[in-house]
Structure formats: structure tokens, C-alpha cells
Image: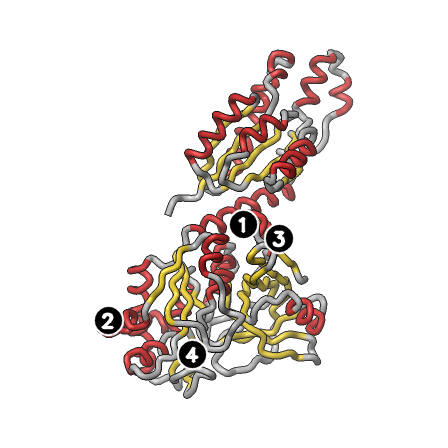
Amino acid sequence: MQSFRVGLFGIGLEAYWSQFPGLEKRLRGYVGEVAKRLGANGRAVIDFGLVDSLDQAVATAEKIRREDPALVVLYATTYALSSTVLAAVRRLRTPVLVLSLQPGKAMDYAAFNALGDRTAMTGEWLAWCSACPMPEIANVFARAGIPFRQVTGALEDDAACWQQIEDWVHAAEVMHALEHCRIGLMGHYYSGMLDIATDLTKLCAVFGPQIEMLEVDELSALRGSAGADEIARVRDRFLEVFDVEAGCDPEELLRAARTAAALDAFVERYRLGAMAYYYKGCGVAANEDTMSSIILGTSLLTGRGIPVAGEYEVKNVLAMKIMDRFGVGGSFSEFYGVDFRDDVVLMGHDGPGHPGIAAGKVKVRPLRVYHGKVGRGLSVEMQVAHGPVTLLSVAEDPQHGFKLVVAEGASEPGPILEIGNTNSRYRFVPGARGFLEAWNAQAPAHHCAIGIGQVAEKVRKLASLLGVGFVRVC
């Protein structure tokens, strides 16, 4: 996977340099300061310098195309001609973020007016007029069909501005991760769930992942070749990560450990970054054994950043991957019911859970039957950690192909359904009824990904970079 890189260049006007000595050097220093701030978290930043003429804009565009950064940051240091800007960005394949950052919160008017020399005063003003070219740039971007994304603020003492920039860069990192993610699909759709079916070609074209079609038979073969030492190691890992209920049969734990060991080999063989699966597992004993013992192993994968969704839910595993890359987890979920007395929505799902966002250790419980699915075995039960949460659904959209539907709420303590599934209670500002009706009005499909923390604005920025729709329900 190519490492994530940010490209940066500033814009100015060559005619100013001979008129106002020291201005060019000063503005180049501002670009250098932005480069330093962008790279503060160890990110690779390619600084293309200050672009101040049409010829330089064309040459810089060629350099950017060769380097192919995941995001280009264009810093309007002072007034610059829109013809220069358009020449620099028109042929880029990369999203562009435009910064309007003046040196500080406000000029010292008294010191400025005391300069006396009108030329010096004009030069000083030009060092502060980052806002000047922005309407012109926005106009030309709109007429050229280039998405206009901007952050306005100050180089110094403006935490809110720099948080916005950081969020844009983080969203670009997530987009980059999606473009380099290989999603494994094993089995087939759960029969009758029409909302899950999607156009894989369009999914790849819009979000950029690669799809690897996998066979259950191959996983079963890997399972059969797993060694005793490896199985024991995975079992010990289960005992470390999970709270294994005393009623769990030790042989069932070993059966799940064998499958988890096979999953690890499967993921490594195909270099998977995510996986969605569903297979009835009836008629071939080895495959039934595999599919009925898969939950613990897929939960461990989800916890280490390789999300796994059941029911062949490729759209939702993409949502889980997005949430994971934003650093907030991403647990597979659906509506379970409503507590109208407490005005909360009950949500959960069978199959894989996300240990990294659980309230305490994930419990492992034995089930004599998997509801709606073949077999029996061990399952996981957990609540999402109490506090702020974000729900995300990747849904079809007639206008953009796909849209990202989000809602922010809170996971709250209280009674849950102790049925060996992930289960939590969620409160939303519109109330349970209002939230459910507003959410369902977006036709989101019945699954979603839940992450801890509130990242709706980051998801909005990601939608902008991807060119997909965005709806915030609450």
C-alpha cells in the first residue's frame, strides 16, 4: 500500500514581489509553517512551494500529478489570479482543500497606520489579505466543475481552524485507506434480504476498494490443516480478550480457536482489510463446522482493524471500515426494538462484535441455536461503551450512487437483551420515535455501523472527498 501523502502549495502574484520587498519571502515562510503543521503527526507532506505565475502553475500541476498525493492543500497566502489557480488544479486527479489563513486573528491597526509609508502599508496589508481571492477561486471552481472545499482562519492562535484542517486530512487518510483496502466476500447474500444487494462495480468505482471473492471450502481446508500449537495459542487469546462463561464447553472453545486460526491464515493469504460473509453451511459437514464456529475469530479480526460483517453485508462492512479508520471502532448493528418508557432505541446484532469499543470485556456465551442460521456454538455478547456514539450507513442514492447517512447519539447503561448478541441502548435528541422515522426516511438498509465518539463532521468531509451524498439525521 502506498503511504498516505499530502501535497501543499501556496499561491501569490508575481507582480507584487518587485513592488513590495520582503513580501515573497514572508509568504513562503507562511507556506512552510503550514507544511510543518500538516506534518506534525508524522504525515508525509510534499511542499511544492509558492506558485505565482501561469507558467509555474502548469509546471507545478505536472509535479503534483507525478507525485500523486492523496490530498492537495492549496494555501491562498495573498491575492492570486484565478487563471493561475485553475491551471494548477484543473487536471489533478486529487481532491483539493483551499486554505484562507491570515497570519493572526487581527492586524494591529495602530501599528499599521503608524508605518507612514504607503508602499510599506500596502505590502503589509497584502500579507494579511488571504480572504481576498477566495470568492474568485470559488466562482471559477464552480464554473469548472471542481468541488470547492475551504477552511478560513488564522495561522496562529486558531485551534478551531486547525481542527477543521486536521479533520479534512483525517478524512483524506480514510479515503486513501478505502482505496487500498481489499474486501473479501465469502458465500452469498442472505436469501430474501434485498436491501443488502448492491452493485459491486459501482461500489469499487466510488469508494475504491478491491473485491476478492472467497470460497468457504478454502477456509474449511485451512481449518483442517491448523496445528495443535496454533489452536492452543488462539484459545489462550480468547481467554485473555473475552470473558468466557463457565458454561462454555472447552471443546467448543477449541473448535472456535481452530476456525480463528484458519481465518488469520485466510486474511494473510489474501491481504484482506475487511470481509463480509454468509453461508448456510448445510449439506457439507466441514463447512457447517466452519460457519458455526466463526464468531469469535471474526470478532478478534474486527477488533484489530479488519472488520467482518455477517449476512454478506458489503455496504456495511465498508461503513465499519470507515468508522475503524476514524478511530472510533465500528460494530455491526441493526434495530432490535424500542423502549418507549425510557425513550431509547435497542440495537445489536448476532455474529462478530468489536472488542475495542465494548463496555468491559466481551462475554462469550453458548447458544444451542443461531436464530435464522444453521448450527450452534459460541457467540459474543457486549454493550457498546457508554457515552457519545455515531451511527453510519452506506446507502444507495439515486443522485450520487451512494450516500453516507449518519446520526449522533449516546450509548446508555440499562437493561439489555442477554441473548448472546451485541446489544446496547441508544438515546437520540429527536427521541426514539423521531429518530427512527427520520433515519428510515433515508432508506438506509437495515444494518449500520456504530462507533464511539461523535464523528459526523468528519464523515461529512469524507463524503465530500468521495463525491457521494451525505445526510445527517441528528
Secondary-structure class at tag 2? loop
x, y percent for residue 289: 31, 80
Going from the N terminus, do you reach mark 4 or mark 1 first?
4
C-alpha separation, residue under disc 2 versus residue under disc 3? 44 Å
Secondary-structure class at tag 3? helix
Residue situated in front as seen by the camera: 96 or 119: 96
Disc 1 packing (10 Å; few <14; some 14–19; many ≥20): some
Q: On the image, numbered disc 4 is attached to which residue?
A: 379
Q: Looking at the image, which residue is at 58% across and 68% down?
A: 386
Secondary-structure class at tag 1? helix
C-alpha separation, residue under disc 3 versus residue under disc 4? 34 Å
Tell me whether circle 4 and circle 1 mark residues in contact (CB < 8 Å): no
Disc 2 packing (10 Å; few <14; some 14–19; many ≥20): some
Q: Looking at the image, which residue is at 45% across and 34% down?
A: 65
Tell me whether circle 3 and circle 4 mark residues in contact (CB < 8 Å): no
Q: On the image, numbered disc 3 is attached to which residue?
A: 457
Q: Is residue 90 left or right of residue 109?
A: left
Secondary-structure class at tag 4? strand
x, y percent for residue 448: 55, 67
Q: Which circle marks residue 226 in the picture?
A: 2
Q: Is residue 136 above or below residue 396?
A: above
Q: On the image, numbered disc 1 is attached to which residue?
A: 466
x, y percent for residue 186: 37, 68
Residue situated in front as seen by the camera: 82 or 354: 82
Q: Amino acid at mark 4?
A: Ser
Q: Amino acid at mark 3?
A: Glu
Occupied quadrant, residue 262: bottom left
Look at discs 4 and 1 and give the one toward the viewer. Answer: 1
Q: Is residue 159 above or below residue 341?
A: above
